[in-house]
Amino acid sequence: MTSIDSNKHKKAKALKPTSRRPAKELCSECGLCDTYYIHYVKEACAFINQQIGELETQTHNRPRNLEDENEVYFGVHQDMMAARKQEPIEGAQWTGIVSSIAIEMLNRGLVEGVVCVQNTKEDRFQPMPIIARTPEEILAARVNKPTLSPNLSVLEQIEKSGMKRLLVIGVGCQIQALRAVEKQLGLEKLYVLGTPCVDNVTRAGLQKFLDTTSRSPDTVVSYEFMQDFRVHFKHEDGSTETVPFFGLKTNQLKDVFAPSCMSCFDYVNSLADLVVGYMGAPFRWQWIVVRNDTGKEMLDLVQDQLDTQPVMSQGNRKEAVQQSIPAYDKGVTLPMWAAKLMGVVIERIGPKGLEYARFSIDSHFTRNYLYVKRNHPEKLEAHVPEFAKRIVGQYKLPD
Ligand code: FAD
Ligand code: SF4
């Protein structure tokens, strides 16, 4: 169990933006090292000291049940469902459940501030983490910034502001580091609202992805890898462009994902109280995982704004995952007509609901396991959590 309990951190000095990070090329720019909490980096960094198991017990008061397949895949939870807002928030990534929960928490006085990420004036994809204190500031942070984002860079301001009740919105690597320093923040109550996260990129990497994949890279306002096996790009004029997964230029895109994301096994944000994503839900619905009582309290605030339905699961992912492993490894790219055809077939007969989520987790964990094995073999044993080893162990991997 982590035992961080000193006040020494205040004497530590944040790194300059240009300095190399302690996790070196694996750094996901979570923001911790931009603050005096860098003092704890060797214990707290998700890429230096993977400790999901210990932190799960600390956060949810029990370990993940490795005898239960749903917990192996989706982490400690007490409930899961599909949901969507009856009145979606215009311009949100999906229907805006994340922003709505944050706004309710602020309006009802449960928290004094919300850590979230807006974008800079000059660039809609350049992340700008803030502590929001008004609903307008939360709304201005809606929609994904599909780039590595230093959300924890505002942590020093929290301790200095004297704030006692806080909501943090973030992805897995940010939340792991946050949980490791949670007790040092001087808070009475910390709420954590997470999203799943995978295949993130630097700002330069994002440009390469847009340039190689979209017909009009400059007008993309957001995109998502959807449950119908297509990337959906939303453009400034309101139009949607779709590109089948199987038509992505894998050979050109192989190096585009950040090394941190190629080494990550916390796709489902195991340490958040409540997780809001989409991949375990039917097409166009969001997917909600309630991990603990705090998460339930947060979800209850917006229940009357949501349509919900139970989670479902359909199909069998295993063969598709096994076949995709060598194809990805060799950088195989299908001609667009074949990719479209394959997209149509797999959408009809392919995995749906929780089975789609398992498909995505299996594909990414096998890829990432190979990446760590080949690039950081000395880290493999300690860095890959037990649940991920079990998932990867179902497949035959190349050397
Ligand atoms: P909104 O109301 O639009 O709010 C979005 C919130 O996300 C904002 O509060 C903002 O502060 C925060 N945010 C935006 N960008 C970042 C960032 N880079 N880092 C941290 N916080 C950020 N879900 C899946 O089920 N499967 C996936 O594979 C998946 N991949 C994702 C990859 C990335 C890089 C991100 C950021 C999210 C991903 N998600 C994934 C989550 C999903 O895309 C939606 O964010 C989620 O369903 C919430 O939608 P919403 O409409 O409720 O959010
Ligand atoms: Fe520091 Fe975060 Fe990078 Fe780790 S991932 S080195 S904690 S900024």
Image: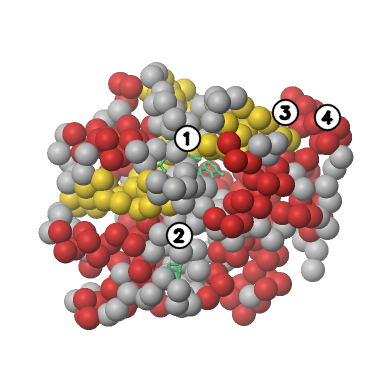
Q: Residues within 10 Å of mark 3 (few under 14, many from 20)?
A: some
Describe the colour scheme in one phrase. secondary structure
Q: Please, what is the three-letter code of the amino acid marked with disc 3?
A: Glu
Question: Is the residue marked 1 within 8 Å of ligand 1, measured from its CB?
Answer: yes
Above/below status of 288 relative to 147: above
Sequence order check, earlier mark of 2 and 1: 1
Above/below status of 48 relative to 257: below
Which residue is nearer to you in this view: 324 or 107? Answer: 107
Quadrant of the image occupied by residue 13: bottom left
Number of the label disc, if any, that sits on residue 110: none
Residue 66 falls left or right of residue 97: right
Q: Residues within 10 Å of mark 2 (few under 14, many from 20)?
A: many
Which residue sits at x=21%, y=47%? 113
Which residue sits at x=61%, y=34%? 233
Q: Which residue is mark 3?
A: 347
- From the image, state whether disc 1 or disc 4 is nearer to you: 1
Sequence order check, earlier mark of 1 and 4: 1
Q: Which residue is mark 4?
A: 341
Residue 84 falls left or right of residue 239: left
Residues tagged 1 and 3 counted as in contact (Cβ below 8 A): no
Q: Which residue is mark 1?
A: 93
Residues tagged 4 and 3 counted as in contact (Cβ below 8 A): no
Question: Is the residue marked 2 within 8 Å of ligand 2, measured from its CB?
Answer: yes
